[in-house]
Image: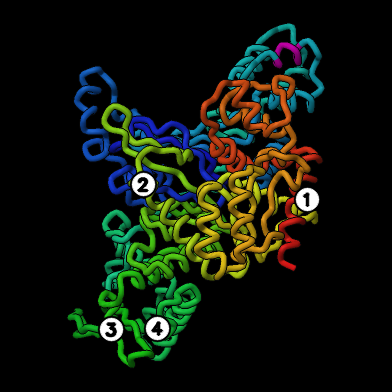
Amino acid sequence: MKLIEIRVEHFRNFIDSSSIKVQPDITCLVGKNESGKTALLHALYRLLPARSNVKFSLAEQYPAWLEKHHRLKGIKLEKVKPISAVYELEEKDKKLITDRYGFGFLSNDKLTLSKDYSGTLYYSIAIDEQKFIKQFLSKRDIPEYLKKEIAKNNNVKSLLENIDQIQERGNVKEDVKKDLLELKNEIEAVLSEDGDLSTSVWKTIESVVPKFFYFHIYSTLPYSVEIDRVLKANESELDDNELTARSLLRLAAADEDYLLNPDYERRKRELENVANALSEDVLKYWSQNPNLRVLPDITQKTIDIPQGRKSVLDELKIRIWDDRHLLSLPFDEHSTGFQWFFSFLAAFSEFEFRETPVIILLDEPALGLHARAQSDFLRFIEERLSPKHQVIYTTHSPFMVQPGKLDRVRIVEDRGRKHGAKVTSDVLTTDSDTLFPLQGALGYDLVQNLFINEHNLVVEGTSDFTYITVLSDYLKERDKVYLNSKWSIVPVGGIDMIPTFVALLGSHLDVTVLIDAQRTGHQKLSHLAREGYLSQKRIITIGEILNRKYADIEDLFSVADYLSIYNEAFSDTIKPDDLNGSDPIISQISRYRKLKNFDHGKPADLFLRKRDEILSKLSEETISNFEKLFERINKTLE
């Protein structure tokens, strides 16, 4: 079961977030401090917490500037639902239903959950109750006139009441009454106690709905843990860091046979096993210092008992040994980055191998890590977490954003008391501070690529980058001609920037340039080629690929294909017959719609976000054009 959509209403600085789409693997929430990123995670966590120590609080979480006003209007704030979520059922989830009832009767594959401020959980499952009724009726030898009468019931409760009414009639034969009674008993046998089909289905799938595991900086392990108190206390009595400590104790098999065994050797061996397992996990993704080892130990104390005095296990203490410096330090005196990483692994160990996966919510993960270590943590999320668990994390660090996967990014902005916080996948925000992590990530990636990669393909802008990378990946999957993996694609911000870029770096880098078929840019590049900055064969125009004098990257698409993308991006209805001319398609569209400036980015952004849907519908003309482009670019490697 996958989380696909969430909505936050009347929670902290959210009034109504509207629908927020969630990626099937990793979703990244980007925004300034106090924009609402953490508030969103807090609301979502409280829907179905993996740890049961969190609840909604009207006094602390209802928007303060609205609370009094809404109470005066008579709104029952306790019944306001601050969080709702839509899950999509997978085949194994639907199988639970068919295994119980013998057939399927869902109208769609969606499950919607919501929770109000009082803590009441609501569920909504689209069920075709008439289909359910017809299936059960088909198994019984009941006269057709009665079947038709019963089938008119649009829900199971009224069906059961109808059967009772029919049985009370004097003109119904005894054998028919017997069949009706058996039908009723058979239906009631698979329903919940209250006879409601939706409730029955919910109870069937409730156990496989993923819960939310939330982790933040205050969840880090303490240096010293009171074993007995932490293990025996109710979850609501423990702080987040103590809950993490309890996860570590459970990982260490905290029972009489192992961790709490009075025999020192047996206890020490178990502690070392746990330490080695966690250390191995940490160091696999921790490139900062591979010489660290975890050294947990347990202290003892003497207590008075009726029979005299007794030595008992007291505290778990965690130290970190550093082979590089040949010393150990208490866990809480080590770097905050290492503390966070190790603590997360300890806390997550309690949930990692459960049959029903959790959805991981990470609030500003890896905040104390160096830029390279943040990249290591992104790799950890990609390789270790997301294959089995959905991950939603917040950040304002450019090093926690993956430039090649901006479809995972959601922008969070606080738009004031009138509108509240909003979450969008549209990066066309006007707030430069909000966009900084994205701009920083793209800039860092660009610099890294320039000075690390041997072969660089320079293109004009991000739309070129989008079309080329997405189509290349798609063609590669289908064993067609694609862009050689040696290429690093570098968008430089427009054709006017390309000659400057080549003049500055072309003599130091292996560069191929792809430009639209425009004379000004081509002439400047040809001049640079004559001056020795660039080989003439490494200047490629779109017009060369299409055998046309003027062409843009968009012209590699067939007219129908590009108009389909354009129309959806701008909610337009232009048809191929509406356009005329042999000039680039963007010029034709601009002329038809009388546009002064054409927005290349919005169609490219739609193409990136709906790539699976769009790619499957592309014509052979479009595919062939991009194959010709990739073949021409790859030849410049020779």
Above/below status of 416 relative to 404:
above
Q: Quote the CA–CA distance across marks 3 and 1.
A: 61 Å
Judged from the image, the secondary structure of the residue bearing numbered disc 4 is strand
Q: Residues within 10 Å of mark 2 (few under 14, many from 20)?
A: many
| Magenta stretch secondary structure, dominant | helix
Verify CB contact (< 8 Å) between mark 1 and mark 2. no
Q: What residue do we see at 47% from left, 33% from top? A: 19
Q: Which comes sooner in the sequence, label 4 or label 2? A: 2
Q: Residue 164: where, in percent of width, then height?
A: 63, 16
Foreground mark, 3 or 1?
1
Q: Which comes sooner in the sequence, label 3 or label 2? A: 2
Judged from the image, the secondary structure of the residue bearing numbered disc 1 is helix
Q: Residues within 10 Å of mark 1 (few under 14, many from 20)?
A: some
Q: Quote the CA–CA distance across marks 4 and 2.
A: 34 Å
In magenta stretch: residue 147: yes
Q: Which comes sooner in the sequence, label 1 or label 2? A: 2
Please state if 524 lies on the left or on the right of 371 as rendered: right
Q: What residue do we see at 51% from left, 43% from top? A: 22
Q: Which mark is residue 329?
A: 3
In front: 129, or 574? 574
Q: Quote the CA–CA distance across marks 1 and 2.
A: 41 Å
Q: Which residues are magenta?
A: 146-151
Q: Residue 531: where, in percent of width, then height?
A: 60, 63
Return the residue at label 1: 628
In magenta stretch: residue 527: no
On the image, which quarter does residue 173 sit in?
Answer: top right
Q: For the view shown, which residue lies furthest in the bottom direction?
A: 326
Give the amino acid type for the residue marked by disc 3 in the picture: Leu
Give the amino acid type for the residue marked by disc 2 in the picture: Gly
Return the residue at label 2: 31
Return the residue at label 4: 292
Is residue 221 in view from this perspective?
Answer: yes
